[in-house]
Structure formats: structure tokens, C-alpha cells
Image (spheres, rainbow, N blue to C red):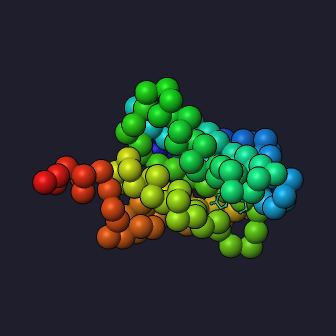
């Protein structure tokens, strides 16, 4: 699929799953769609909790869902929320993205504004799995 079509599809899927967000505390609904290297799309929304700290972001939900199905190689992730600008993933999600290497990340809003970035740009000089290979 050409890049423009792929992004359109990712945006559509992320907007669809965003409607399922459980966000009664923040009222900030987020949707994420994740494209695997072999062309599958996994999605996730944010799921909040009365014990606030247990809330799960849309991006991590999508990544964990893909990993649970055996997927570990990702081409692109798109995250969408409502607002004038595009949504910025939290630090925890950036670290979880980094675990699975380098891929494109599209930050979007529900009006279709999209900004392209990538994991290494969102989290430079990151700690990652390779750091644990140097055990002594
Ligand atoms: N949230 C996400 O799901 N992804 C982001 O990129 C930003 C923040 C969620 C967490 C919480 O449920 C709500 O948005 C407000 O922080």
C-alpha cells in the first residue's frame, strides 16, 4: 500500500478505536493503531481506572495487544486525540515503543492533522534492551 493510503487507514482505525476509550476521569479519549512489518494492524484505546495510576494509554494498549499475538516487528504507530495540535505520547509509552526498535510514529488529531516522527526522535539517547547485553 502506498504511504498516504496506509496513513489514512491507520488514522481511520485509530479514530474508530478511540470511540471505545474508557476515560471517565480525564475525558481525554485516545486511539492508537499499530502497523506490523507484515501488514497487520493492531489497535488500542486508553483505559482509565478509579485508582488513577493504573490507567493504560492507547499506545501501550495497541503494542501489548500486538505482542500478545506474537508480533514484535513494527513499521508505524499512529496516535490520535481531539485537540488543536497533535497528541504527544507520554514518556512511559515512548520507552515501551523503544523496546521494539525504530519505527515511524504519526501524531494526529481527529481533524486529520498529522505529524510524522519516529521512535528515536521521541526518545533520544534511550535505555534499551541492548544495554542489558553488556552484563559483567
Ligand atoms: N493518554 C494516552 O492514552 N496517550 C497519550 O499519548 C497521552 C495520554 C491518556 C492517558 C489518560 O487516560 C488520558 O490520556 C489523559 O492523560
Farthest-out residue, bottom:
84
Farthest-out residue, left:
136
Q: Quadrant of the C terminus?
A: bottom left
Farthest-out residue, top:
69
Task: Specify the quadrant of the image occupied by residue 36.
Answer: top left
Residue lying at 77% horizontally and 49% vertically, measured from the top left: 49
| Residue 45 appears in view | yes
Total residue callouts: 0
Q: Where is residue 30 in the image (x, y as percent from the top left)?
A: 71, 54
| Residue 5 appears in view | no
Residue lying at 46% horizontally and 45% vertically, measured from the top left: 2
Please tell me whether residue 76 is drawn above or below residue 42 in the rendered image.
below
Report whether 23 appears left or right of 43: right
Q: Where is residue 6 in the image (x, y as percent from the top left)?
A: 53, 44
Please tell me whether residue 66 is drawn above or below residue 121 in the rendered image.
above
Ligand 1 quadrant assignment? bottom right
Please tell me whether residue 45 is drawn above or below residue 113 in the rendered image.
above
Amino acid at each position: 500500500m502506498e504511504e498516504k493510503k496506509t496513513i489514512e487507514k491507520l488514522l481511520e482505525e485509530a479514530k474508530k478505536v478511540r470511540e471505545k476509550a474508557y476515560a471517565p476521569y480525564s475525558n481525554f479519549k485516545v486511539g492508537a493503531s499499530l502497523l506490523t512489518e507484515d501488514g497487520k494492524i493492531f489497535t488500542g484505546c486508553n483505559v482509565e481506572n478509579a485508582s488513577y495510576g493504573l490507567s493504560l494509554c492507547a499506545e501501550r494498549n495497541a503494542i501489548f495487544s500486538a505482542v500478545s499475538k506474537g508480533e514484535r516487528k513494527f513499521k508505524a504507530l499512529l496516535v490520535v486525540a481531539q485537540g488543536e495540535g497533535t497528541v504527544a505520547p507520554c514518556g512511559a509509552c515512548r520507552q515501551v515503543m523503544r523496546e521494539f526498535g525504530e519505527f515511524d510514529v504519526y501524531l494526529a488529531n481527529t481533524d486529520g492533522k498529522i505529524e510524522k516522527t519516529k521512535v528515536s526522535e521521541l526518545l533520544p539517547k534511550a535505555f534499551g534492551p541492548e544495554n542489558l547485553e553488556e552484563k559483567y
